[in-house]
Image (cartoon, coloured by chain):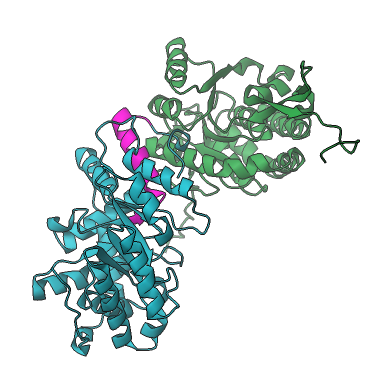
Chain colours: A green, B cyan
Amino acid sequence: MAKQSRLEVWKTYKNYVGGQFPRTESGRSYAVKNAMGKTIANVCQSSRKDVRDGVSAARSAWSAWNNRSGFNRGQILYRIAEMLEGRKKQLSDLLVTQGYTAAAATQEINRSTDRLIYYAGWCDKYQSLFSAVNPVASAHYNFSVPESMGVVGMLAPANASLLGVVSLMAPCIAGGNTCLILADQEKPLAAVSFAEVLHSADVPGGVVNILTGYQQELIDWISSHVDVNAMVCFDQEKADWQKIQEIGAGHIKRTFQWNAKQLATAAGQSPYFIMDLQEIKTTWHPIQTIGGKGGAY
Amino acid sequence: MTFKKPVFNAQILNHPPVEQTGVEERTVRFTKRSIKGPSKMQGLLMVLSMIDLTTLEGKDTPGKVNQLCTKAVHLHDQVPGLPTVAAICVYPSMVSIAKKALKGSSIKVASVATAFPSGQTSLRIKLADTRLAVEDGADEVDMVISRGKFLAGEYAYVFDEIASVKEVCGTARLKVILETGELGTLDQVRKASSIAIAAGADFIKTSTGKIQPAATLPVTLVMLETIRDHYHKTGKKVGMKPAGGISKSKLALHYLVMVKETLGDVWLDKHWFRFGASSLANDVLMQVAKETMGNYQSPAYFSID
């Protein structure tokens, strides 16, 4: 009898929502091809209901994530970097299958790790840097402090499978937001595998949610979702970008377009990306002589 | 119509055993019906009209009750043509406040009574509690049964207690809370349902909302079947109110499917079916708004309750 050859076990790539890896609610999938046009994997073709579930997971996770200290969020971002370092090989192989050279893949992973460390450092610093005590003409202290916006919808850029997702996610969650990321349509595998890194890195479920699917199908559902407070994308077609802004304006959604060309450079990271996703809260506090004669304390 | 106090007859407890697996499998089927488009919209509006908007907290204040009554009347004025909820459900001490706030609307005031939620007091106190609610104008009374007595096998006691409360209710409709989460098995649920119905309940209700598990599909199905059997035997209709734990529209629609397929269209009316809930209303409203406007909504734009 001829010896049977072993069947390869192919990995099923699934969404990452609320700290779990569900298939799309719609049951649909699409084939991801490599540069030669050969199918290398099937991934979920998410539907609007996955967007709905992702946003609701992000919303439930937001309050607790936002209430963690900046220091603790920094620890967790640092932990993501540590776990990513440990999975270098797996992610590098994935990037290579998707058309990266080995050197480019290593570089992309290193940049991603460094970027996580960079934002880990900013977690407990941006607030002091961008806060202000404002002079006012009455007996009040007047503070302005940046606070997280809430849930952010993010569209990953093309041609930066991993770095794109990290550069979106890190400044967003560093500032206490939670997010729903739609992975790049053509090269989503690294993004989905990155979800496994997040999952093992103390990131509470729901803080980061990653979907795969067709941008053109889902973009309207994300931009029109009233519970998505801000939206970030890269280099959209002019008409698409205008539409995102128009739909978002209906419920004062903040919309941003970041520059994908800068991703791999030093300009691809900055505390100002954190600040894009912050609202400034100003507080008036009456001044009293604390502990002094006649003080009320 | 005056209420003639019935006498306990142990015959009502005779029923074939409830088969738990069968009930569970049957209820799973109800969750598989596809309800889309106009049917879904109609279902959602029906759910809204069947809600007993509830606040039963130790921290309830007149302000809270007034706010809830305003919400009951103006569910979400941005969407025109919405029904109001069926009733407001409060503690006896809040009945007069709710009654005043709802004056001129068709929304009923339901009051829990009989030492809600535990029911651990004497019949005398329970009747006084009920009387207080009714005198203050409650249209409906939600009483709890004595689960301790029930579990000890004192069925006649439980029966008489319900009948006595019903007597005090006068024209107010009586909902009998079985607190199924404390009864243990579906057989017990069936037994308690039969006792409540025979003793004069206008509605049977699953739970107080203070005990987990509260309303579940299997428990509700057993109660609906008891109602159905009673209807077939006597021709008399009894209402049903699942309460506690129903906070999502989809689940509420599953309940409606179950009512339709167990009891029929006649029961799909707020006179015969209610949801005891507080957060369900907002979820349904968000769904209605989504169906109307086409995009997903945010809880931040709906009243807090």
Query: Which residues lie in the magenta part?
Result: B276-295
Residue positioned 24% across, 54% down in the render: B256
The image quarter in which residue B272 lies? bottom left
Q: Tell whether position B25 is magenta.
A: no
Quadrant containing the N terminus of chain A is: bottom left
Outermost residue on the front side: it is B135
- Nearer the observer, A107 or B243: B243
Secondary structure mostly taken by the magenta-highlighted segment of the chain: helix
* Total numbered labels placed on residues in the image: 0
Dividing the picture into quarters, in which one does residue B72 lie? top left
User: Residue A88 sits in which quadrant?
Assistant: top right
Q: Would residue B269 be found to the left or right of residue B296 on screen? A: left
Q: Is residue A133 above or below residue A294?
A: above
Residue lying farthest to the top in this orientation: A238
Q: Position of residue B70 (x, y in %)?
A: 37, 41
In percent of width and height, residue B277 lies at: 37, 54
Instruction: Determine whether, in the image, residue A237 is placed left or right of residue B71.
Output: right
Q: Is residue A166 or residue B46 the one in the foreground?
A: B46
**Is B174 left or right of B209, judged from the image as shown?**
left
Task: Say above or below: B290 vs B273.
Answer: above
Q: Can see residue A267?
A: yes
Does A244 appear above or below A209?
above
B292 falls in the magenta region: yes
Image coordinates of residue A174 in percent, x first then y, are 68, 34
Measured as percent of width and height from the top left, residue A296 is found at: 81, 39
Instruction: Quadrant for the C terminus of chain A, please.
Output: top right
> Can residue B19 be seen in this snapshot?
no
